[in-house]
Amino acid sequence: MRDHLNNQNVPDSLVVLLLGLALGVYSLVGFFTAPVRTAWILSPYLFPLLLAVFAVLLSAALFAEGRSETEKSRAEAAAAKPAARGLSKLPAVALTGILYCALLAPLGFIPSTVLFLAALLWLLGERRRWMIAAVALLTPLVLYALFGLALGVRLP
């Protein structure tokens, strides 16, 4: 048991679980005590409830990963050269976000999001071109289909 608590994923999963449960309780209490009754789809408490569900699922995944991690894999990870972390990529990521905001108006949502995601994935270290292309192309198309077409939400 002590070995599991020393794994960083287990305490992180507990924190994420508590935050997800708190957000879920907030959403449910807010919805059922709201002075104006609306359908869930129109409620401002739907999005926090969805975030709470995803947080609980993330918590379960983190906990499972922490439990399954062995001493050998931790030793291998410690012996491997650590990835460059810190603030070195922060200016590039911030500049990419600023460029994305600037390109939204002239290019539109889908082209500018494709460029933004491709640049961001490359900056964060992904080098497989097929993966960059798949994520950069499918993400804005799925978002457009869900929000623009299915829910009728105007995208930038």
Image (cartoon, grey):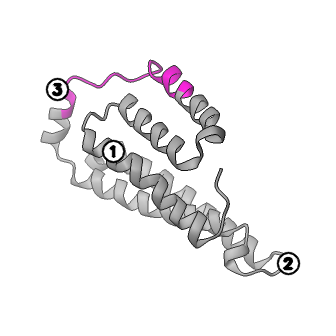
Query: In this figure, what is the number of numbered marks?
Result: 3
- Seen from this angle, which residue lies furthest left? 72
Residue matched to label 1: 133
Where is residue 73 drawn, in percent x and y? 16, 41
Which is nearer the eye, 151 or 108? Answer: 108
Where is residue 54 drawn, in percent x and y? 49, 62
The amino acid at mark 3 is Ala
For the magenta stretch, what is the residue range? 77-95
Q: Nearer the viewer, mark 2 or mark 1?
A: 1
Q: Nearer the viewer, mark 2 or mark 3?
A: 2
| Quarter where residue 7 is shown | top left
State the separation of the CA atoms marked 1 and 3: 32 Å
Residue matched to label 2: 36
Q: Nearer the viewer, mark 1 or mark 3?
A: 1
| Quarter where residue 117 is shown | top left
Q: Earlier in the sequence, mark 1 or mark 3?
A: 3
Where is residue 88 drawn, in percent x and y? 44, 18
Please rate how many residues cluster around mark 1, counting C-alpha atoms within 10 Å: few if below 14, some from 14 to 19, many from 20. some
97 displayed left or right of 9:
right
Q: Is residue 153 visible?
A: yes
37 displayed left or right of 92:
right
Which is nearer the eye, 119 or 7? Answer: 119
Q: Residue at x 80, y 77 (%)?
A: 33
The amino acid at mark 2 is Val
State the separation of the CA atoms marked 2 and 3: 58 Å
Residue matched to label 3: 79
The amino acid at mark 1 is Ala
